[in-house]
Image (spheres, rainbow, N blue to C red):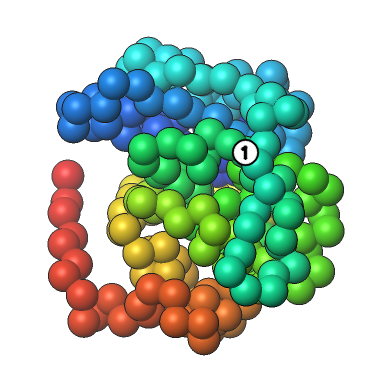
């Protein structure tokens, strides 16, 4: 999403993306696509993030989002995101894996799984910041990612979402994966000492009954490597 190198923590760790590509093929995938509707220049972001090189080395198809290739979000309820353009390949795929980096965000407090789904939205995304909790949760409900993998290997704890100062980055060497996007975001926010209810879109997802905030009651496996 951003023209930053991996150590700044502004983008998902390329090693995490590469490992997921490899695991997808091991699970029987015929093709793995990696893409983002970047905030910064897409060509520079793909290269300088290290993601393009790392994912292609594992056999992924890494490509830029075509401006014509969007579908309009539709909802069975009134939504401020009705008709919003969402990248077609995120919707019309067999399995969509959402792979955000855990980092500070100046407006929402944290970027996590639900917030990261703005990365497959088109349109004037700055307009999503008005009533952002409702809009983010509605888009998560529309896209319904099958798996959320939160990269917390490096945590940009200040000056997000773009970062740039290595003094703002904390090494955590952690990755969180869940089929429940709310649960993943709750777990990640607590990992960095933040009350999930203080993150507006998490609180709204819980209020709407999307997923579960109670990871202590779930089957959580912690693996040290």
User: Where in the figure is residue 34, as x and y percent of width and height?
Assistant: 48, 28
Q: Is residue 206 above or below residue 59?
A: below
Residue drawn at (18%, 32%), measured in percent from left and top?
27
The N terminus - image quarter: top right
User: Where in the figure is residue 212, as x and y percent of width and height?
Assistant: 35, 77
Residue drawn at (44%, 75%), measured in percent from left and top?
210
Give the residue number, with chain letter if any, for mark 1. 87
Q: Return the residue nearer the eye: 152 or 88.
A: 88
User: Where in the figure is residue 147, as x and y percent of width and height?
Assistant: 35, 51
Residue drawn at (51%, 43%), measured in percent from left and top?
91
Q: Return the residue nearer the eye: 3 or 210.
A: 210
Q: Is residue 124 left or right of residue 36?
A: right
Rendering quarter of residue 16: top left
**Residue 186 visible, this orientation:** no
The C terminus - image quarter: top left
**Residue 63 visible, this orientation:** yes
Q: Is residue 194 above or below residue 3?
A: below
Rendering quarter of residue 55: top left
Q: Residues within 10 Å of mark 1 (few under 14, many from 20)?
A: many
Q: Is residue 117 left or right of residue 165?
A: left
Secondary structure under tag 1 reads strand
Residue drawn at (38%, 73%), measured in percent from left and top?
211
């Amino acid at each position: 999403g951003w023209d930053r190198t991996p150590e700044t923590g502004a983008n998902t760790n390329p090693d995490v993306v590469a490992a997921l590509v490899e695991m997808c093929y091991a699970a029987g995938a015929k093709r793995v696509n990696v893409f983002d509707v970047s905030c910064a220049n897409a060509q520079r972001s793909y290269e300088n993030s290290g993601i393009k090189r790392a994912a292609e080395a594992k056999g992924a198809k890494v490509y830029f989002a075509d401006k014509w290739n969007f579908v309009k979000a539709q909802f069975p309820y009134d939504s401020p995101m009705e008709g919003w353009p969402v990248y077609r390949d995120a919707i019309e795929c067999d399995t969509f894996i959402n792979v955000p980096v855990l980092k500070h965000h100046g407006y929402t407090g944290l970027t996590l799984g639900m917030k990261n789904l703005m990365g497959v939205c088109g349109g004037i995304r700055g307009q999503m910041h008005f009533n952002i909790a409702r809009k983010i949760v509605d888009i998560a409900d529309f896209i319904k990612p099958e798996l959320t993998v939160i990269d917390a290997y490096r945590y940009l704890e200040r000056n997000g979402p773009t970062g740039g100062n290595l003094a703002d980055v904390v090494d955590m060497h952690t990755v969180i994966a869940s089929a429940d996007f709310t649960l993943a975001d709750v777990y990640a926010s607590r990992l960095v000492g933040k009350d999930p209810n203080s993150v507006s879109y998490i609180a709204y997802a819980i209020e709407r009954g999307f997923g579960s905030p109670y990871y202590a009651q779930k089957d959580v496996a912690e693996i040290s490597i």
